[in-house]
Amino acid sequence: MDQAALSNVVSLAYSLPELVLGASVVALFLLDLVVKRKALLGDFALLALAIVVMLSARLLWSDSAALYNGAIVLDGFALFFKLLLSLAAFVTVWMSLGSREIQRSDTGEYWPILLASTLGMLFMASATNLLMAYLALEFVSLTSYVLSGFMRHSRRASEASLKYLIYGGVASGTMIYGMSWVYGLSGSLDFRAIHAALLASNGVSLPLFVALLLTLAGLGFKVAAFPFHMWAPDVYQGAPIPVTAFLSVGSKAAGFALMIRFFFTAMAEPAGAGVYQLVGGADWSKLLLVLSILTMTFGNLAAITQQANVKRLLAYSSIAHAGYMLMGFAVLTDDGLRAMLFYLTVYYLMNLGAFVVVMMVANSTGREDLAGYRGLAWRGGAVPAVAMAIFLFSLTGIPPFAGFVGKFYLFAAVVEKQLYLLAIVGVLNSVVSLVYYARIVRTMFLEQPIGGEGAVVVDWHNGVLLGLLTVGTLLLGFWGPLIEFAGRSTHFLSY
């Protein structure tokens, strides 16, 4: 339904989650000057994010609105990602409070920077203007560079942060150059005006395709899609484990949110029966189809070769899962988007759960290598080992876990669009992924410790979080309201 954009003052009433996050960031920086026990700042951040989640949930019953004169919107799609991203940040703060890496740093800046990054992600999900989208993405990128190199005395973390910065700078420059082409072709920064201009244009397919290719470089960097993935393995390995988990879920979700809104509202339009058609003459759906195949295939093949570091293996796994999610993007249907949003939710559960186990092992043994998981089930880590097996089999897509349900919806949307090659490649890649996921399970249960691995202690703080994520991975895939919520969230506000 079309409606006028609200003024800046009126829009404030719809921006309570962002206002609370912004105020919390300022408060945390000020509290850092006077509070000596920095863990208290983490408790404050956790409380602030709990409030943000509740405020975002309350907005589900609000009318959709275009805010700040059309710079951002509040619609079902934006609210879906507000909840997902704020929950991802909540779990990350919870993890950080139980992380030995973060505890040893004893610095208070970590918490406001993490909340500031979350704030930028919320704006990425709501942006309907190229300038707003770019500023939000850059804000998230800059805070992510700082978080990944937060362990200042770690050479590995410093290297990860530097590589992230270099790759991010190149991707950002490429993306804004592509956006300038889009502006030149349409004469506007607003997604709706871009759509109208391209709908009325003729013969601009080649320059538009180049513009979209350049823009996709920046967005592909954010979701770690091939060939813009180069930063992910080093950054995932070098960053503190809670930050790695946050980047693998929050940053990826925000990138997909911006990518979906830009392509589906500015570059396509509903054609009835839940199908979208392209405008402007550039067939970018085939580009995304190829990108999906290359991303999932490269990610899985590269993960098979990882024998040393579990975080690096999960980095390549994350690249592969970006390829699976792009399947739902490429079909250009509401069913594809619904499957994509649903899969992002279950991926949030199982991937964060896997990183919680990695953190628990690292807390107890100081090890992140695969050899450190030998006989995990028999040296005090039976609960983390069983949970890790559940998360890994869910990531593979084995029933009855939530990952299977998520992939089922993705493959169903692809088959319904008769993209059989894409479906076959997706199934084969899922089979390939079982090789390296099962390797970790075999190491935990079938290999005997040879000494030096160390006992694993399950504390109540991390144990509660692990239990919640495990139960969600077991049950949430079969919870009907979740897929219904994902389906309602595929509709974008037109104003």
Image (spheres, helix red, strand yellow):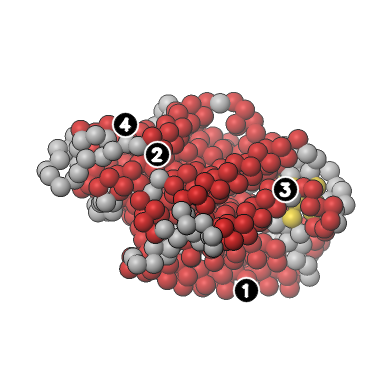
Lower sequence index among marks 1 and 4: 1
Observer-nearest of 351 and 377: 377
Q: Nearer the viewer, mark 4 or mark 3?
A: 3
Residue wearing tag 2: 462
Image label count: 4
State how far apart marks 4 and 3 are (Cα).
Answer: 39 Å
Lower sequence index among marks 2 and 1: 1
Q: Residue lying farthest left? A: 450
Coordinates of residue 436 in the picture (x, y in percent): 30, 44
State how far apart marks 2 and 1 are (Cα).
Answer: 44 Å
Residue wearing tag 4: 383
- Which of the 4 quarters of the picture holds residue 150? bottom left
Residue wearing tag 1: 177
- Is residue 321 visible in this depiction of the protein? no
Look at 59% across and 26% down and name the residue there: 480
Which amino acid is tagged 2?
A: Asn
Coordinates of residue 440 in the picture (x, y in percent): 27, 41
Label 1 SS: helix
- Position of residue 11 in the picture relative to residue 209 (left or right): right
